[in-house]
Amino acid sequence: MLAFIVFLSLAIQPFAPQGFFSVSGTVRDETGNAVPSVRLSLVDENYQPMRTVFADSSGRFQFRGLRAGNYYLRVEPTGLPYEEQSVQIELQSLTRRSSTTEEPTLVDVILKRKKLLTPGASPGTVFIQVIPTAARDEYNRGLKSIKKDPDSGVRALKKALEIFPDYFDALELLGTEYVKLGQFDRATPVLIRALTINGKAGSSMYWLGVAHLKLNRFNESIEWLQQAAIYSPGNPNVYMMLGLALGNTHSLDQAETAFKKAYQLGGAEVADAHLYLAGIYNKQEKYGEAWKQLELYLKEARGLKDKTQINEMITKLKAKEKAKQ
């Protein structure tokens, strides 16, 4: 996708796993009460969405059949008066287990309440809807089936919207699933509709920005991702995508700032930021800074099978730096 990044073709693969893992836990508020119906999304170390579940009536959730590796659990309490959270999870076997045994990992999430702001302030506004029972039933039906049977799930979400066209959660979920399915043209009007209903929805802004990025509508992508950064300031993926969009408009200084912000928030979990920064510095003929970023990438990236290509690039960049002197 990025012409200015020469390192995108490098494959980043996780180590071969030993057995499988499960991740389970409970979502609670700061008083210890369970928070039901919260959306939890699991993202892999390459920032690709893997699975989405919703906490049950007791706030419990579970992901099963996971491979060893590094993950990012994103908690999105859309429509509830709580802040979004992200939790880093590293699944690594400590003992030898058979491939049929799942090694459990417990993750308890404590949600912080949003701070209510004065009118005109942006983040933290609580959004609440009263949903007709029939629409909610269709939404729940779609939610349960969308991972195993996306077509069935999408149909149920559409039925929910036929009953209640302003159903924000259904619009956001439908738009998000369209993005994950690669149906970007379908996703954009749905997410825009969601944002006309809840203009403070950082997750909708993020996915709309991603959809525009995939459609090569870079200016629109930048606009929405910048808004997402206001309403979801703690999500490093927002800044990663923003950096990519800015890079495609040749706004290299701004892209550099975005990638640095992503790394500040995500640390080694967004080690790819070093690759993108190296590409920017190479383009700017800052070869010394470029190879240093690649060395940081080698140090922090997990699961690299073959470091040969990166080492070769470091050697070439050092040669360029020496020739420039």
Image: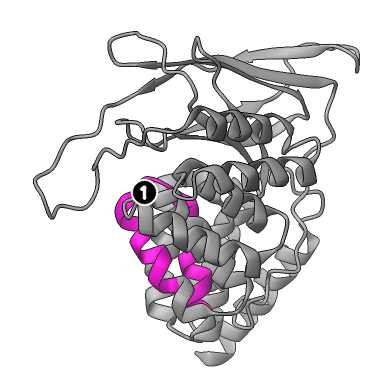
Q: Residue furthest left?
A: 118
Determine whether, in the image, residue 119 is placed left or right of residue 201. Answer: left
State how the image is colored. Answer: one colour
Magenta stretch encompasses residue 256? no
How dense is the environment of label 1, judged by Cα within 10 Å: few (below 14), some, or many (20 and up)?
A: many
- Above or below for 99 versus 237: above
- Above or below for 308 versus 94: below
Q: Residue at x 77, y 58 (%)?
A: 11
- x, y percent for residue 72: 56, 37
- Above or below for 112 versus 84: above
Foreground residue among 319 and 187: 187
The residue at which mark 1 appears reads as 232
Amino acid type assigned to the residue bearing label 1 in the image: Ser
Determine whether, in the image, residue 87 is placed left or right of residue 234. Answer: right
Q: Give the dominant element type of the magenta stretch: helix, strand or loop.
A: helix
- x, y percent for residue 120: 13, 55
Determine whether, in the image, residue 280 is placed left or right of residue 110. Answer: right
Residue 269 seen by the camera: no
Foreground residue among 104 and 157: 157
Tag count: 1
Q: Residue furthest right?
A: 99
Stretch of the chain drawn in magenta? 222-247
Q: Residue at x 59, y 82 (%)?
A: 4
Foreground residue among 252 and 48: 48
Residue 16 seen by the camera: yes
Q: Residue at x 49, y 14 (%)?
A: 59
Secondary structure at badge 1 equals: loop
Magenta stretch encompasses residue 229? yes
Q: Quadrant of the N terminus?
A: bottom right
